[in-house]
Image (spheres, rainbow, N blue to C red):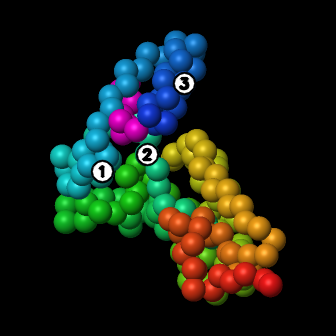
Amino acid sequence: ITYRTTDEPLRLQTAQLIQTYLAACGIRVSIETMPSEALFAPGPEGVLFGRRFDLAQFSWRTAPDPLCDLFLSSQIPDVGHWDRPNVVGFLDDEYDTACLSALEALPGSTEYVTGHVEAQRIFSERLPVLPLFQRLKVTLARTSVIGLAPDPTQTSELWNIEQLDLRP
C-alpha cells in the first residue's frame, strides 16, 4: 500500500506513525511525499482529485457547522469537474438525503440539526475518510482586550481587527 502526503514535517511524522501501526497489523506501507501542488493537482493526473492513491493524508477546510457537502455523491471529481471535494468517491444515497435535508433547512431548525446528526451517524458507520486530528488554535489576550472572537475558519486570530479595543 502506498501512503501519499505532502512533504510537510508534521504530515511525514504522522505518516510514519501510521506506517508503524499498520506494520504491527501485518500491513506494509510505503510512504510517498510530494509538494502540496502535486498532491492537490487537478484533473485525472492529480493524486487526490484524480483519485490516484491507496491511502492519502491531507488537510481539509473546517467550519463551525458540519461540512457534509464535502462527501455528497454529486461532489465526486470527474471530467470537467476536477475541483469537487469528494476525493474518496464516497457514494451513499442515505447520506446524500440526510445531508441535503440539513443543507436545505434553516440553521438552528429541527430539520437542520436532524439532517446533520443523521449524516454524521452514516459517515461514522461507513467511514469514507478517517479524520486524524484537528489543529488547535490557541489565542491568548489580556483581560482588557474586548471584541476578540476566535474563529476556526479564519487564518488569523485578528480577522475582526476593526472590532478589537482595549478596556480602560
Residue drawn 19% across the image and 50% down it: 44
As helix, strand or loop, the secondary structure at mark 2 comes to loop
Q: Are marks 1 and 3 in contact (CB under 8 Å)?
A: no
The span from disc 1 to disc 3 (Cα, nearest Å) is: 23 Å
Disc 1 target residue: 40
Mark linked to residue 17: 3
Q: Around disc 1, counting alpha carbons within 10 Å, would you say few (fewer than 14), some (14 to 19), or many (20 or more)?
A: some
Q: Which quarter of the figure has residue 86? A: bottom left
Q: What residue type is labelled 3?
A: Leu
Which quarter of the rendered picture does the C terminus lie within?
Answer: bottom right
Quarter location, residue 73:
bottom left
Q: Of helix, strand and loop, which mostly describes the magenta segment? A: strand
Query: How far apart are the alpha carbons under marks 2 and 1?
Result: 9 Å
Left or right: where 130 falls relative to 52: right
Please give the range of residues in magenta.
1-8
Q: Say what amino acid the circle numbered 2 marks.
A: Phe
Residue at the disc numbered 2: 58
